[in-house]
């Protein structure tokens, strides 16, 4: 398995500037759609009783990156370095845009879900570069000291990453909130269709990234599938476990589980395709495959658990 996954690293993903611009536009559109559901007045209960909000932020912004780091350290003999760095990058990304839709299906606390998405997305300008730099840096130092094969040099421009995250997430988020505030009638009509389009557009984004590399995707998908299955399962379990440890109600527990398990891997793809952040000479095949498949799999797992919970009444 290690050898097969290591073979991904030299794989060069054929991608052009037009495709990159399309992916940027799609991600900005998706984040604009997320912002349409953000109404500041709905967050008042979250801040007057902030326990669930703080637990959710801890689970997503601190616990998930930490647990991911521990996984890749413990199993470093089975997980190649660039695949591990892809897992760390996904864990550093904010909550996924479709988590709110999934929370509504699963009878979770939707206000909490929207609040966590909004906050994690807003903070991602800082937390995504910081988490990737901290945990990625620790992993690089560990693997170069303990592994037989040292990791290729990986110097990331953190300020460029900060700028990219702000442009792709921050600006659409601000515009979406303003749009919803000043045009509530139109917002009410387009919000639901945009949620469904977001899922379709993300799949389009992944297809664009791999349309010229489909044979490579099929060749290595089995091993990537196992890695992402375990990682995503642990992310969901982390959210559920931390919410349960703090004795939160069932609706809050469901919301935090989904928020922790649904990551904005689309942002991860955009960062990976940005040559100013990840220079083209780096062999990033492992990171790209893990990040892209995460984006597909978390939709499947998230919808699966959401429909399961939709049939289960809240326990309290």
Image (cartoon, rainbow, N blue to C red):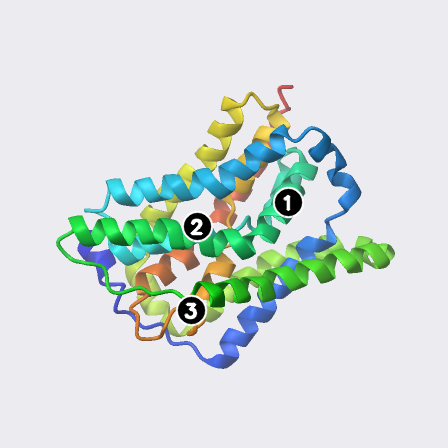
Q: Earlier in the sequence, mark 2 or mark 1?
A: 1
Residue on which disc 2 sits: 131
Position of residue 283 relative to residue 304, above or below, is: below
Q: CA distance from mark 2 to mark 3?
A: 15 Å
Q: Secondary structure at mark 3?
A: loop
- Residue 155, position as x, y percentages in the image: 34, 65
Front disc: 3 or 1 = 3
Q: Residues within 10 Å of mark 2 (few under 14, many from 20)?
A: many
Residue on which disc 1 sits: 100
Position of residue 55 relative to residue 116, above or below, is: above
Q: CA distance from mark 2 to mark 1?
A: 23 Å
Residue on which disc 3 sits: 277
Spot the residue most to the front: 159
Residue located at (64% from left, 24% from top): 313
Residue located at (47% from left, 37% from top): 236
- Residue 190, position as x, y percentages in the image: 77, 58
Q: Please indicate whether residue 98 sits to the left or right of residue 40 in the image.
A: left
Spot the residue most to the left: 148
- Residue 91, position as x, y percentages in the image: 44, 48
Q: Earlier in the sequence, mark 2 or mark 3?
A: 2
Q: Secondary structure at mark 2?
A: helix
- Residue nearest the viewer, comparing 45 with 192: 45
Position of residue 284 relative to residue 251, above or below, is: below
């Amino acid at each position: 398995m290690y050898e097969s996954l290591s073979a991904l690293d030299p794989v060069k993903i054929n991608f052009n500037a037009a495709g990159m611009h399309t992916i940027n536009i799609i991600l900005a559109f998706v984040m604009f759609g997320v912002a349409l559901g953000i109404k500041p007045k709905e967050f008042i209960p979250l801040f007057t009783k902030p326990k669930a909000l703080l637990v959710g932020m801890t689970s997503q912004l601190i616990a998930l990156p930490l647990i991911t780091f521990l996984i890749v350290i413990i199993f470093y003999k089975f997980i190649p370095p660039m695949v591990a760095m892809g897992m760390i990058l996904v864990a550093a990304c904010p909550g996924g845009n479709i988590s709110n839709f999934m929370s509504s299906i699963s009878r979770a606390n939707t206000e909490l879900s929207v609040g966590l998405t909004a906050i994690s997305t807003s903070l991602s300008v800082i937390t995504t570069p910081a988490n990737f730099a901290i945990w990625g840096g620790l992993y690089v130092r560990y693997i170069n000291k303990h592994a037989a094969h040292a990791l290729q040099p990986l110097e990331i421009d953190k300020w460029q990453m900060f700028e990219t995250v702000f442009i792709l997430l921050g600006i659409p988020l601000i515009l979406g909130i303003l749009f919803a505030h000043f045009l509530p009638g139109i917002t009410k009509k387009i919000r639901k269709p945009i949620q469904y389009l977001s899922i379709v557009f993300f799949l389009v984004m992944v297809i664009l990234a791999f349309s010229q590399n489909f044979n490579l995707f099929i060749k290595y998908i089995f091993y990537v599938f196992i890695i992402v299955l375990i990682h995503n399962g642990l992310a969901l379990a982390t959210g559920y476990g931390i919410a349960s440890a703090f004795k939160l109600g069932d609706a809050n527990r469901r919301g935090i589980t989904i928020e922790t398990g649904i990551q904005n891997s689309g942002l991860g793809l955009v960062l990976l395709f940005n040559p100013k952040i990840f220079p083209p000479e780096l062999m990033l095949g492992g990171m790209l495959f893990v990040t892209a498949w995460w984006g597909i799999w978390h939709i499947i797992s998230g919808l699966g658990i959401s429909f399961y919970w939709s049939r289960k009444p809240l326990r309290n």
